[in-house]
Image (tube, helix red, strand yellow):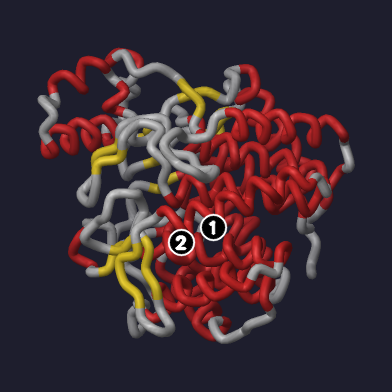
Amino acid sequence: MVAIPLGKKQKYQEICLDVLQAAKRQNYAGYSKFDALNSPLLQTLSLDNTWLRLFFTQIVNRCPFHVRPLLGVKKSRNPKGVALFARAYLLLYSSTGDEFFKAESEKLLQWLIDNKAEGSRYSSWGYNFVWQNTIFLQGKNEPNCVVSVFVGEAFVHAYRLLKDEKYLLVARDVANFIIKELPVLFESRNEMAIDYVQEKSDCVVLNINALAGVFLAKVWKQTQEQEHLEFAKKVLGFTVNRRTPYNAWYYTHPKGRSPIEHDNYHTGGILDALLSYFEETGDNQYMTVYWRGLDYYQRHLFEQNGAPRWMNNKKYPFDVHGAAQGIISFAKAASYDKAFLSQAVIIADWALANLYRSNTHDFAYRRGRFVTWNYSLMRWCNAWMARALGEIVSIT
């Protein structure tokens, strides 16, 4: 692989550390993209009505001004963000050997152990806010698949790097949550679709199956429990088989259940899952789909200067999460084709030039054609970019 120039690599590492230190000074607590209903005012005004909850959630999310403090939304820790920060520290520890990074990751992992969601027999986590979307209503701290998988991934990462058996036990417990507590929305001999949340939905969120599948494959690699591998094969197979003829994915199946079509970061997450499944199992049946999908991802979801497109058919806004996902996805691909390393670098440089705020050591939310959302969201912006910069530093 062609290495990143030493000076550029040092810059990425320094900014990653600055972001982590700034987050630590805030106790890793902040605002979230969909936390509008943590406002007592908006919660009251919503009148327990689905459409009012959805309206308030979306209007705050889309507002280019930072209205959350004015609405009484409090900063808090997001378990998914904590898991991403923990992985950023683990990546820095693996590349530097600095015990400080190990200690910080262990503190965050212990917080996750101590703050599991209630109402489940198994280790699981949910979002730190009430979330109304077009598919479901998710209560505050109610366990769901995506947060639990991201946290579970952090524990697998920690077990592999630090060799502490307690982390594998947590990851295995998360696998049980996925297999035993999430509704099955579809099942055939070779496919399965599971739900995002514990209350049965009327559509499948496609990236959830891919994320859950590769996590279960990682747990299988450590435990050799065949149930995990069989489940992984079926849920990944469902997502792969719902791709378009041009190797892209809608957010939901059926596609009309969400306004999201072929968006940036969900596409990258699915592709990462297909590559990781091959790495964990040696099963290469999805690799042709992976490379074709990666080509679509690069050509249709990024500008030539590295700016992350919002969707395949919509350029703006350029969202920090899309930049972080692109860095991670192309850095991973560069392990097999060094040409993709330059794409990861281009995206990282764009994010630093356009969204990094050096005075506060954090990242702005996103940029539109005429306006910048010049405020930071702890998990969406900083946890993701810390993880992304840690990824590119650790593999080069």
Image location of residue 337, percent across then percent down = 69, 76
Q: Is residue 371 above or below residue 287?
A: above
Marks 1, 2: nearer the viewer: 1
The quadrant of the picture occupied by the N terminus is bottom right
Secondary structure, mark 1, is: helix
Image location of residue 338, percent across then percent down = 72, 72
Q: Are marks 1 and 2 in contact (CB under 8 Å)?
A: yes
Q: Which residue is mark 1?
A: 326
Residue found at x 38% / y 37%:
142
The quadrant of the picture occupied by the C terminus is bottom right
> In terms of depth relative to the viewer, which is nearer, 162 or 333?
162
> In terms of depth relative to the viewer, which is nearer, 394 or 36?
36
Give the side of residue 153 with respect to residue 314, left or right: right
Residue found at x 53% / y 55%:
176
Local crowd at mark 1 within 10 Å, few (<14), some, or many (≥20)?
many
Give the side of residue 264 with respect to residue 361, left or right: left
Residue 61: tell me if it is visible.
yes
> In terms of depth relative to the viewer, which is nearer, 171 or 2?
171
Disc 1 to disc 2, C-alpha distance: 9 Å
Give the side of residue 283 with respect to residue 45, left or right: right
Q: Is residue 140 above or below residue 265?
A: above
Snapshot quadrant of residue 72? top left
Q: Is residue 393 above or below residue 49?
A: below
> In terms of depth relative to the viewer, which is nearer, 277 or 159?
159
Residue found at x 68% / y 72%:
279
Q: Which residue is mark 2?
A: 302
Residue 342: tell me if it is visible.
no
Secondary structure, mark 2, is: loop
Snapshot quadrant of residue 56? top left
Snapshot quadrant of residue 326? bottom right
